[in-house]
Image (cartoon, grey):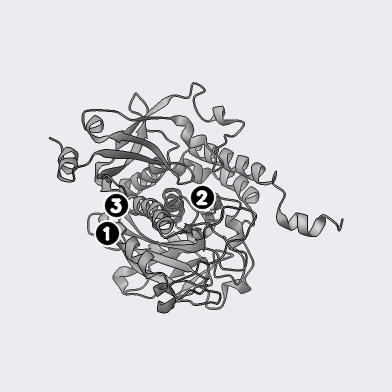
Amino acid sequence: MTDIEQWFRDNAITEVECLVPDMTGIPRGKIMPARKYISGGKPRLPETIFVQTVTGDYPDDCYDHINPSEVDMLLVADTSSVRLVPWANEPTAQLIHDCVYVDGDPVSIAPRHVLRRILDTYEQRGWQAVVAPELEFYLVNRNTDPDYPLEAPVGRSGRRETGRRSYSIDAVNEFDPLFEEMYEFCEAQNLTIETLVHEDGAAQVEINFLHGDPLKLADEVFLFKRTMREVALRHGIYATFMAKPIASEPGSSMHVHQSVVDRETGRNMFVGDDGKPNKQCLSYMGGLQKYLPLAMPLLAPNVNSYRRLRPDMAAPINTEWGYDNRTVGLRVPIDEPDATRIENRLAGADANPYLAIAATLACGYLGMMERLDPTPPLYGSGYDRPHSLPTDLSQALQPFTECRELRDLLGDRFVDTFAALKRSEYVAYFRIISSWEREHLLMSV
C-alpha cells in the first residue's frame, strides 16, 4: 500500500479533486471517486486548458501554441500536496497535479512547471531560493451586476466600514466568525499562514505566509485563494483578489520576500560577514531593477492590474529600492542579519503565484549571474521619482516577449503562449463600452 493510499484510508476519503493551476491561477481539473483514483485511474485533461483566457475564450492563434489535435495530458499527482477539502460534505481529498504528455515529457507551458524550471536553475548552482508571500484581498458585498460598483460588507456592528482603518484590530473583529472559519480551514489544509492584519482599504485584509520553499508557498497561495473565496461565500459575501476592485480604495498586492541560501552550508547568501547586505544581495537587487519592468505581465497580468500601480495609493510606480522604505518597488526590511532579504512589492494579488514567484526569482538570478550593480538606495519617497513601470497590459507585453534573457529562463513556448492569451484578453476588454464612456460621452461629444 502506498503512502497516499494509507492517507486516503486514514481519512476515509470517498472523493478526490485533481487540481491543476491554469495560466490565470484558476483551479482546473477533475473529480473522481477515491477508489477509482487509488486503483490506477489516470486523470487526463486537454492541453487547451493552458490556452484558455480568463473569459473562457481562446486566442485566434491558439493552435500556434498547442497541438491542433488538442492532445490529452496525463495528470501526475504531487503527493506532498494532498490535503483535505475542509468544506466538503463528504471526506474529500485535493491533490495538485503536474502535467506530462503520454511520452512522459513535461508540459512546458504549465505554470507549475515554469516555476520548477527556475528552481532547477537555482539548484544547478547549489542554491536554494526562499520566499514568503504576503497576500492582500478585499471583503465585499455580493454583487451580481458587473456595472454596479463594489462596496464593503456590513460587519457585526451592523455598520459598513467607510474610512481608513489600517492595522485596526476592531475592524478585523467585525468579521470574527468569518476569520475563525478561515483559520480553521487553513489549519485543516496545513497552510502556513502567520499573521492577519487590516490594510489601508475598507474591509481590506492582508495574510502573511511563513517563509519556505517557493513551490510549496505557491501551492499554498493557490489553495488559500480558493479557501478564502469559499469561506466568504459561506458568510454571504465575496472575497476578491482583484488588483484594484474599488476605484477610491488602494489596490491589493502580493508582496514576495525572497532570499537565497547556499544548499551545502545553509548560509543566507545575501548577508556579509559584517551582517549587512553583501555584493550578491546587491547584484540580485540589480537584476530585479533591470528585468522586473520587462517581466511585468507575470506580476500584473490583467487589464485591471495597472489601475493599482498609481502614485500615492500604497503601490509602487518604479523599481527604486531602499531600506525599510514602503514607497519603493523593492524594499530591504530591517531585521536580524540571518533574515536579510528583499521584498518585491510590484506583484498584484491577482497574479498567478507560480508565475509571479518564478518571474521575481528569474530576475534576481540574472542579476547575480551578470553581477549587476543596483542604483543607490533611496531614502526619500519613491513617488518623487519617475513612473518607470508599464502603465497598461498592452505596453507591457512587447518588452516581455522581446527579452531574450527571460525567454531562456522561462522558455520560448511559455512566453509566446502567455503573451497570446494576454493580447486576446486585452482585445476582449476593449470591446466593452464602460459606464464612464456612457456617462461622460453619451450626450457631450
Q: Nearer the viewer, mark 1 or mark 3?
A: 3
Badge 2 marks a residue whose secondary structure is helix
In what quadrant of the picture does the C terminus appear? bottom right
The relative height of residue 265 versus residue 34 in the rendered view (above or below) is below
User: Which numbered disc, 1 or 2, marks the residue closer to the eye?
Assistant: 1
Residue density around tag 3, few if under 14, some if 14–19, many if 20 or more, within 10 Å: some
- Observer-nearest of 410 and 80: 80
* Residue in the picture at 57% in, 76% down: 381
Q: Which mark is residue 298?
A: 2
The amino acid type of the residue labelled 3 equals Pro
C-alpha separation, residue under disc 1 versus residue under disc 3: 9 Å
**Cα separation between marks 3 and 2:** 31 Å
List the single residue furthest toward the left.
1
SS at mark 1 in the image: helix
The residue furthest front is 158
Q: Is residue 273 visible?
A: no
Position of residue 445 relative to residue 377, above or below, is above
Quadrant of image for the N terminus: top left
Count neighbours of disc 1 (C-alpha within 10 A) and say few if under 14, some if 14 to 19, many if 20 or more. few
Query: In the image, what residue type sits under mark 2?
Result: Leu
- Residue farthest along the right direction in this orientation: 445
Q: Earlier in the sequence, mark 3 or mark 2?
A: 3
Quarter of the figure with residue 168: bottom left
User: Alpha-carbon distance for marks 1 and 2?
Assistant: 29 Å
Counting from the top left corner in percent of width and height, residue 81 is at 28, 46
**Any mark on residue 86, and which?**
3
Residue located beneath label 1 in the image: 187
